[in-house]
Image: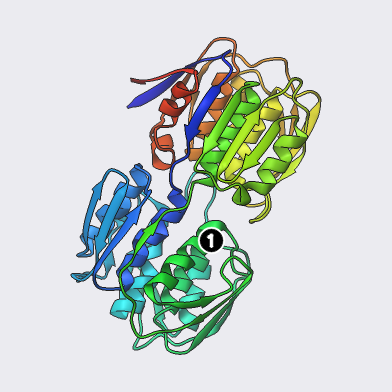
Amino acid sequence: MDKILVQGGRQLQGTVQVSGAKNAALPILVSALLCDGLNTFTNVPILRDIQSTLQLLAHLGVRCSMEGHTVQVDASGLNNDEAPYDLVRKMRASILVLGPLVARLKKARVSLPGGCAIGARPINLHLHGLELLGARIDLSHGYVEAVCEQLRGAEIYFDMVTVTGTENIMMAAVLAQGTTVLRNAACEPEVKALADVLKQMGARIHGAGTPEIVIHGVERLHPVSAAIIPDRIETGTLMTAAALTQGDVTIQSAEPEHLEAVIHKLRLAGAQIDVSGSQIRVQGQRPIQSVDIKTLPYPGFPTDMQAQFMVLMAVAQGSSLISETIFENRFIHVSELQRMGADITVTGNSALIKGVARLSGAPVMATDLRASACLILAGLVSDNTTEVNRVYHLDRGYEALEAKFQQLGAAIRRVKA
């Protein structure tokens, strides 16, 4: 099992290119289930979750290949409606095959994904939406079994904003008879990116990126060639690292419009940020100012940036309050930051951070994807060596992050544990 060693104290300098977005790539790859023919997707990040998705699609009878950052998917041979536990357990996003399978094959048997380190993330909203579209749902022996004669359009209100729920029902509804209206839908850029690809396939979708999405069902879709949007969370992580180290970093191939909340908070913290097209330049300044944040659905401050921003506040001047409203267990990384000398007190869903002069390198354990990035960032501003263990979490969602930090001058390396 790999671990990452970080020697703190270096300012990050230079230019780096951001990868494609994992959270956009996963549903877009799955959307290929909805049509026959060869789909080609470019700018796909090379990640463990991408490989898990391709394994699952192959199990369903789909031909998949990946060469560099290009993935080809052909579901002409789709012949299996079951997503088994051994494949689904690797990645919660596997539940996204449920909607397309029901729409295409009129039946699906998908393992329940279970909980994860940062919270339960139940799929009841996915199931309720499919029932309203006309599917019969049965939960048996740890599996969701869904069957229908024909999905039919419906009005669906999500009791809470759900990204994967919105994506799952949207994919099911594109082949349903009639019109479907999704209310309180997720507005994330990844949802709009999926809708854009579905429209390119021939789907009739209006309003993606807003709380109300209208889908007029069509009889069939056709294959496409499409590029994956830039990863806004990787971009935000690199931006925070630049601000944290008082560096001067230019990030290329980004999408600044997807990061307005993060850019606003980093500027309040004292960073100088210049945006030009798809390029973002971040210059860190001393002292770092304390800023309160509250995680919210898009376009609010993303929960996937909360842990990284907490590191910035841990060495800021004064005190700050971080409120987490999306996931109930998303402060697991706090105990590891405390081991490195951070002064953080958690009460319920809020964390009070009192800035300290510096952090101290220590052996730490990554508990989830974003906690992995958080601990690496903490290592960048520690006075000794930080040893981040269990970095397989990192490989699920960041493509070669340590190599990108090396490129920017960080003293960081991956070693076999």
The residue sitting at 26% across, 70% down in the picture is: 81
Q: Residue at x 59, y 17 (%)?
A: 11
The residue that appears at 36% across and 47% down in the rendered structure is 49
Work out whether residue 332 can be spotted.
no
| Residue 138 in picture, x, y percent from top left | 39, 75
Kind of residue at badge 1: Val
In the rendered image, residue 62, in percent from the top left (x then y), is placed at 22, 63
Q: Position of residue 357 (x, y in %)?
A: 72, 15
The answer to whether any part of residue 38 appears in the image is yes
Q: Nearer the viewer, residue 392 or 46?
A: 46
On-image quarter of the N terminus: top left
**Residue at horizontal 63%, vertical 65%?**
160
Direction from residue 214 to residue 262 in the image, left or right = right
Tell which residue pokes out farthest to the top in this image: 384
- Element on which disc 1 rests: helix
Find residue 216 and report its horizontal and vertical position in percent: 48, 84
Which sits in the foreground, 78 or 265? 265
Query: What quarter of the picture does the C terminus occupy?
Result: top left
Which residue ends up furthest to the right in the rendered image? 318
Compared to residue 346, the image places residue 360 above or below, namely: above
Q: Which residue is mark 1?
A: 163
At label 1, counting other C-alpha atoms closer than 10 Å, the crowd grade (few under 14, some 14-19, many 20 or more) is some
